[in-house]
Structure formats: C-alpha cells, structure tokens
Image (tube, rainbow, N blue to C red):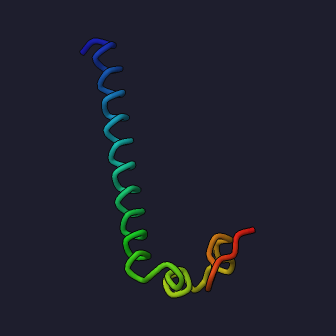
Amino acid sequence: MKKSEKIMMAVAIGLLTGLAIYAVRRSKERRVLNRLAEEGYETASDILFPDKERLSDKLHFGPVLPE
C-alpha cells in the first residue's frame, strides 16, 4: 500500500467515525426533546429532571409581561 493510500484510508475512517458520533448524539438529543415535548412546556423540566437545581431563565409560569 502506498503512503497516500494509507493517509486517505485514515482520513476516511476518521470521517466515518465523526459521522457516527454525530448521529448518536443527534438521536439522543432528539429523544430528550421529544420526551420534553410530550410532557408539556411548563412542567416538563420539573417532572423529567427533578435533580436539576436551577431552571432556565426563559421558563415562566403564568402570563409573561413584556419588559
């Protein structure tokens, strides 16, 4: 095998590994977001992630008044 073929093979393997990692992370993120969407916006983080101490600043209960 030539040196250039080895380099191209290593680049291809690295690219495929990167794509696989991207696909796994994306599917995991979609599962979490779908689970949140099923619960509803206002209560989802309370129910699904009770151990999280600080909720998002963008989460408001009740009417939101413009600032």
> Which percent across, then down, holds residue 25?
41, 56
Image position of 46 with respect to 34: above or below: below
Locate residue 46 relative to residue 35 in the image: left or right: right
Q: Which image quarter: residue 18?
A: top left
> Which percent across, then down, holds residue 51?
60, 84
Image position of 21 with respect to 28: above or below: above
Q: Looking at the image, which residue is at 75% across and 68% down?
A: 67
Image position of 15 with respect to 8: above or below: below
Farthest residue to the front: give it: 66
Q: Looking at the image, which residue is at 49% across and 82% down?
A: 44
Q: Which image quarter: residue 15?
A: top left
Residue closer to the observer: 64 or 11? 64
Q: Looking at the image, which residue is at 68% across and 80% down?
A: 53
Locate residue 46 relative to residue 21 in the image: left or right: right
> Which percent across, then down, holds residue 39?
42, 83
Residue closer to the observer: 46 or 61? 61
Residue closer to the observer: 48 or 8? 48
Q: Looking at the image, which residue is at 37% across and 71% down?
A: 34
